[in-house]
Image: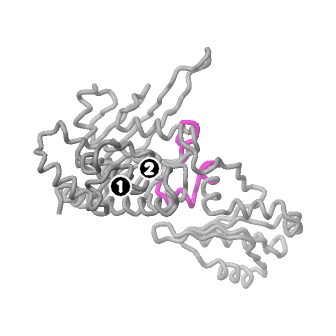
């Protein structure tokens, strides 16, 4: 076992023994303000954000381009100074530290980026050992550690090639190995999969999830893609115009989103927005629209929509016709969204809606479901 694994696993075991996981990173009322242009008021890239990242979290921060995600994550290692508020890491306030005081702290807060930032004139091995150049470690030990990390990320055979000879996914694996060379406690990923194709994105996300499980590595993942969040994150924060509009466990946020933006991300990631557009615009569903009996049903842990429709028919004589639906499995738990038309007397439909609530199914009338135009996937943040 490498020293990276042994050290971190020891810390993870100690944390588990304490029961509830300890806070690793905390932001308290963080604001980042930039001067306005041409006499305009100052611009708040981050606006009064408070959040807590616990040890072992895979914490996703999602928002559209320009939402402030990248600025926010840079406050976590103080690459971006806060205008007000504070950043605490391992119980120590770090946002007011000097650059020299930050050096040992930043060794424990690693970061990877969308465009890898590898040195093209250096081999893969030399790129990985680069952060150790000024450390008190022999070249032989640095090389041995780098080779162990390259094996850990699945590219041990690429040690002596140059970045230009690698695919995008392989280059990101090099960047991850380089980030791990200092034995960090937290890895900040700023749109780390945005430049990759879907298949490579899945492989990198699988790697990050494996590193989280094997090393106890805490991960913060900045993205504009809800699918990325659904694939690996345990907690999620939604950012809109610099403000935190939703924050919580992934299943809790999916089941009970508190902002329109969060609902928009959820609907889009499940393709339910396509079903909504179809029902609202196609002549095929004109009768259901005019009757006002179309509902969006959402549930966590159900996954038996046909049985649910049979239940309301048996109990209330209501016929439920499934128009469009999607079921995701998030952390081994089904999360379903279906569009249905409910046909029956007003009292019977009312009874069916009340029944849905008793079995953990949220029913929203079509008229109350709002989805704005989403920005194109693949846009860069800030």
How many numbered callouts? 2
Q: Residue at x 40, y 49 (%)?
A: 220
Identify the mark at residue 233; answer none if there is no mark.
none
Q: Earlier in the sequence, mark 1 or mark 2?
A: 1
Q: Is residue 152 visible?
A: no
110 horizontally vs 203: left or right: left
Q: In the rendered view of the protein, which quadrant contains the N terminus?
A: bottom left
Question: Which label sits in the foreground, 1 or 2?
Answer: 1
Q: Residue at x 21, y 56 (%)?
A: 147
Q: CA separation, marks 1 and 2?
A: 10 Å
Residue sticking out furthest to the top:
39
Colouring style: one colour
Residue under label 2: 192
Percent from the top left, x then y, of residue 27?
40, 38
Q: Secondary structure at mark 1?
A: helix
Which is nearer the eye, 165 or 305?
165
Q: Which residues are magenta?
A: 239-263
Residue closer to the observer: 362 or 64: 64
Residue tagged 1 = 173
Magenta segment includes 69: no
Q: Residue at x 42, y 40 (%)?
A: 73
Q: Secondary structure at mark 2?
A: loop
Q: Using the image, determine if residue 181 lies above or below residue 79.
A: below
Q: Is residue 222 above or below residue 68?
A: below
């Amino acid at each position: 076992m490498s020293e990276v694994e042994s050290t971190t696993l020891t810390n993870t075991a100690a944390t588990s023994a304490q029961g509830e996981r300890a806070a690793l990173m905390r932001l308290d009322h963080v604001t980042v303000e930039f001067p306005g242009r041409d006499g305009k008021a100052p611009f708040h890239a981050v606006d009064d954000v408070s959040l807590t990242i616990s040890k072992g979290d895979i914490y996703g921060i999602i928002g559209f381009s320009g939402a402030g995600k990248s600025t926010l994550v840079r406050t976590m290692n103080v690459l971006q100074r806060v205008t007000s508020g504070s950043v605490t890491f391992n119980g120590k306030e770090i946002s007011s530290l000097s650059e020299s005081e930050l050096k040992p702290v930043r060794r424990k807060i690693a970061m990877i980026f969308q465009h890898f930032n590898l040195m093209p004139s250096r081999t893969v091995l030399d790129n990985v050992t680069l952060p150790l150049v000024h450390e008190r470690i022999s070249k032989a030990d640095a090389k041995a550690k780098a080779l162990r990390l390259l094996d850990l990320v699945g590219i041990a055979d690429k040690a002596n090639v140059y970045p230009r000879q690698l695919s995008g996914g392989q280059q990101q694996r090099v960047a991850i190995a380089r980030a791990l060379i200092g034995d960090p406690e937290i890895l900040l990923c700023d749109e780390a999969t945005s430049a990759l194709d879907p298949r490579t994105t899945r492989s990198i996300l699988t790697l990050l999830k494996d590193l989280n499980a094997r090393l106890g590595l805490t991960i913060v993942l900045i993205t504009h893609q809800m699918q990325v969040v659904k694939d690996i994150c345990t907690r999620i924060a939604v950012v809109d115009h610099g403000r935190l509009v939703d924050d919580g466990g992934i299943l809790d946020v999916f089941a009970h989103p508190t902002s329109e933006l969060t609902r928009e991300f959820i609907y889009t990631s499940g393709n339910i927005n396509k079903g909504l557009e179809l029902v609202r615009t196609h002549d095929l569903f004109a009768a259901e629209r005019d009757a006002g009996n179309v509902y969006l049903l959402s549930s966590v842990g159900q996954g038996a929509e046909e049985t649910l429709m049979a239940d309301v028919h048996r109990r209330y004589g209501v016929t439920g016709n499934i128009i469009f639906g999607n079921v995701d499995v998030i952390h081994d738990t089904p999360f379903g969204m279906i569009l249905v038309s409910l046909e029956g007397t007003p009292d019977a439909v009312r009874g069916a809606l009340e029944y849905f609530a008793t079995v953990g199914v949220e029913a929203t009338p079509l008229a109350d479901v709002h989805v704005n135009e989403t920005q194109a996937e693949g846009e860069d943040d800030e």
